[in-house]
Image: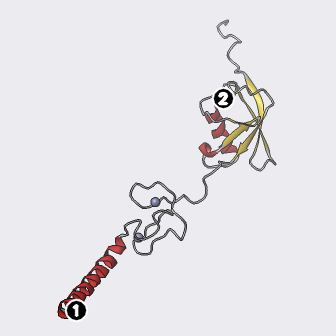
C-alpha cells in the first residue's frame, strides 16, 4: 500500500482572476500554472459566452498574451493575478472589400468605388471606367468608335468633294 506517492498527484494550481471585456465582472479561475493560453481562452469563452475563443485577447500587466501555446507560468503570471479580456482590435464589422481590378490589393472605396456598369468595386486608382478597363465600357467604346469612324468618313467625303 505504499505505491501511491503524494507527489505529482495534485497539480500546482493557483487562482487567477479575469476581468471581462466590460471590466465589471471578474471571473475567478483555479487552474494549473501549466495551463496554456489557448486552454484559458477556451475556458473563458465558455464562461463568458463568447463564441470564438480565438478572437479573445488576454492582457496581463499591459502585455498581450498572444502565444496560444505558452503557459501562465511562462508568462510569469503569479497566483492572484488579474488578467483582462479584450475584444479583437478589428473584425466583427463588415469585411473590407478589395478592389476588383486584376491583382490590385487596395481596399475598394465605399459607394464612390462602385461601378454601375460592371458591378465591380474599385479603389481610388481604378474607380474610373477607363482605369479598370470596365467591361461595361467595352460596348460604349465600340459605339463611340463607330460613331467617330462615321464622322471621320463623312469629313473625308466632304474634303474630297472640296477638291
Ligand atoms: Zn485598385
Ligand atoms: Zn466598371
Q: Which residue is depicted at the point 53% across and 64% down? A: 109
For discs 2 and 1, the disc positioned in front in the rendered view? 1
Write down the residue under mark 2.
35
Relative to 106, 135 lies left or right: left
Label 2 Cα crowd, 10 Å radius (few <14 / some 14-19 / many 20+):
some
Question: What element does badge 1 sit on?
Answer: helix
Give coordinates of residue 9: x percent, y percent: 68, 17
Q: Quadrant of residue 44?
A: top right
Give coordinates of residue 141: x percent, y percent: 32, 76
- Looking at the image, is mark 2 or mark 1 earlier in the sequence? 2
Coloring scheme used: secondary structure
Relative to 105, 32 lies left or right: right
Give coordinates of residue 136: x percent, y percent: 36, 74
Numbered mark located on residue 158 in the image: 1
Q: Nearer the viewer, residue 129 or 74?
A: 129
Q: Which residue is depicted at the point 43% across and 67% down? A: 120
Amino acid at each position: 500500500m505504499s505505491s501511491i506517492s503524494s507527489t505529482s498527484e495534485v497539480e500546482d494550481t493557483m487562482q487567477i482572476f479575469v476581468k471581462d471585456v466590460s471590466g465589471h465582472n471578474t471571473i475567478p479561475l483555479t487552474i494549473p500554472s501549466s495551463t496554456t493560453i489557448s486552454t484559458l481562452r477556451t475556458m473563458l469563452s465558455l464562461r463568458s459566452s463568447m463564441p470564438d475563443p480565438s478572437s479573445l485577447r488576454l492582457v496581463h500587466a499591459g502585455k498581450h498574451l498572444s502565444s496560444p501555446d505558452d503557459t501562465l507560468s511562462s508568462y510569469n503570471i503569479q497566483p492572484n493575478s488579474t488578467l483582462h479580456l479584450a475584444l479583437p482590435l478589428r473584425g466583427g464589422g463588415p469585411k473590407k472589400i478589395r478592389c476588383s481590378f486584376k491583382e490590385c490589393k487596395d481596399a475598394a472605396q465605399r459607394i464612390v468605388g462602385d461601378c454601375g456598369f460592371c458591378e465591380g468595386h474599385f479603389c481610388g486608382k481604378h474607380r474610373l471606367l477607363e482605369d479598370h478597363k470596365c467591361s461595361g465600357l467595352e460596348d460604349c467604346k465600340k459605339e463611340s468608335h463607330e460613331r467617330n469612324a462615321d464622322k471621320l468618313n463623312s469629313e473625308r467625303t466632304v474634303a474630297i468633294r472640296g477638291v
